[in-house]
Image (cartoon, helix red, strand yellow):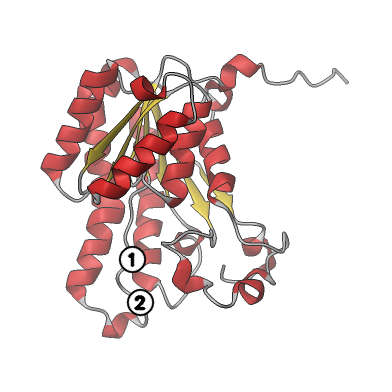
Amino acid sequence: MSPVTPIPAELADLSDRAAIVTGGSRGIGYAIAAELLARGASVTITARKPDELAASVQQLAAAVPDGDKRVLGLPGNAGDPESRAQTVGRSVERFGRLDILVNNAGVNPVYGPLMDADLDGVRKVFDINVVACLGYLQQAYRAWMGEHGGAVVNLASTAGLRSTGVIAAYGASKAALIRLTEELAAQLGPEIRVNAVAPAVVKTKFATALYENREEETARPYPMKRLGSPEDVASLVGFLVSDAASWITGETVRVDGGILATGNLG
């Protein structure tokens, strides 16, 4: 048997590439931005709160060489078409290209049984978690990727793969995003690769309600015996947008500490 040839380091390098990470001021989005910067990319992050965004930009820029030139923060709401257009336009203007799109922004204002769900809240969940992802990619396609290609990663969830009960609307939206990912991969290859990642419970402010004051109990069913960290997700995203993953598209990769393998809901 021939020895396995390791992946050349240059395939994981993202130098001379530019990325947009939505919802990038904290949690998973921030960790993804840091990962892409560490691999050499220039990164635009978006968020709804300008002060929090500015602080995150400062921290990210301080952590990498030429950070003041490689990090751009743009306040905006992912659900606003004008905001999406401005984000893509200004990012391309700043960096001269747009090779990577990470659709990370998401909301979850609807908890509990669907029969009691406020339909306006459900619409918001689908608008931000699904429609906005397509809207961002449409803008990226028109501005750069349609002619030059690129890589896209959508942040899905294990809730999109298996019923959870308490976050049913959120899970349904992530299931739709997984399906959308496959459609886009089929339509946009070979120039544009589109994948998704599906985390289980990750220790972020967004997911606090799922583990607060009971983290040990929540983590007990996981084979890895801990909840996820933002960096667990970020390292996978960094791989998927790199040339090391050049034959991977249309996939939803679970990063869940093994919880779905146990048959638990996650």
Nearest the viewer among 114 and 20 is 20
Q: Residue at x 29, y 41 (%)?
A: 46
The answer to whether residue 189 is above or below residue 168 is above
| Crowdedness near tag 1: few (<14), some (14–19) or many (≥20) residues, C-alpha within 10 Å | many
Q: Check the picture and name the quadrant holding the C terminus.
A: bottom right
In the displayed structure image, the side of residue 141 where residue 225 appears, left or right? right
Spatial distance from mark 1 to mark 2, Cα to Cα? 8 Å
Quarter of image, res 222:
bottom right
Q: Check the picture and name the quadrant holding the N terminus.
A: top right
Of the residues shown, which amino acid type is indicated by label 2? Tyr
Q: Residue at x 34, y 20 (%)?
A: 69
Of the residues shown, which amino acid type is indicated by label 1? Asn
- Residue annotated with mark 2: 111
State the mark number for residue 228. none
Q: Secondary structure at mark 2?
A: loop
Q: Secondary structure at mark 1?
A: loop
Nearest the viewer among 193 and 21 is 21
In the rendered image, residue 8, in percent from the top left (x then y), is placed at 66, 16
Look at the image and tell me whether residue 166 can be seen: yes
The answer to whether residue 154 is above or below residue 191 is below
In the rendered image, residue 242, in percent from the top left (x then y), is placed at 51, 25
- Residue annotated with mark 1: 108
In the displayed structure image, the side of residue 87 where residue 206 appears, left or right? right
